[in-house]
Image: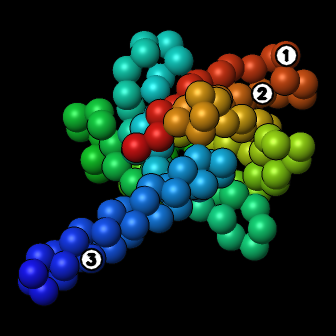
Amino acid sequence: MNRRLRSVICAVALSTTDLAGAAGASSDLRSPVGTWKTIDDKTGQARSVVRIYEQGGTLFARIERTLVPGDETRTCTKCTDDRKDQPLIGLVFMRSMKGVDGAFQDGDILDPDNGSIYRCKLRLESGGTKLKVRGFIGVSLFGRSQTWERE
């Protein structure tokens, strides 16, 4: 009987730990911090896995790995700033995004394919499992959007 009671107590303790972990994971869905699979807005294909992280109260993103065969050793040859000729893997391509009214903005995003830097806005969707990323010049009306999927 004593052994059985211990088994029940252990099972309850483990399930409580699992619930606490699940609650912690769901609270992460309110923030874009984490890893995301980027989806190309033109082809609909996954291109890379990126990590969004917080530094000094603002958000940044770097490329963790590419999903395009042959891009593992590619460098940003078209970049015109300090990222010129840097490897794509590890490249910080989004900088200084600030939280404003439930969205993130006032930073910039680099398109490594053409070296252009755009203003950027981020917005979580679908309960935090998708991230709408909009890069634009001047006003948001003139730009492109991608929807990334949480990894």
What residue do we see at 79% from left, 41% from top? 103
Of the numbered discs 1 and 3, the one sitting upstream in the chain is 3
Q: Nearer the viewer, residue 48 or 36?
A: 36
Q: Which residue is denoted by mark 1 in the rendering?
A: 141
Of the numbered discs 2 and 3, the one sitting upstream in the chain is 3
Image spot of residue 80 (x, y percent): 65, 47
Query: Which mark is drawn over residue 136?
Result: 2
CA–CA distance between discs 1 and 2? Answer: 7 Å
Report the amino acid beneath label 3: Ile
Compared to residue 151, the image places residue 138 above or below, namely above
What residue do we see at 66% from left, 65% from top? 54
Q: Which residue is denoted by mark 3 in the rendering?
A: 9
User: Within 10 angstroms of label 3, few (less than 14), some, or many (20 or more) residues?
Assistant: few
Compared to residue 44, the image places residue 140 above or below, namely below
Of the numbered discs 1 and 2, the one sitting upstream in the chain is 2
What residue do we see at 75% from left, 20% from top? 143
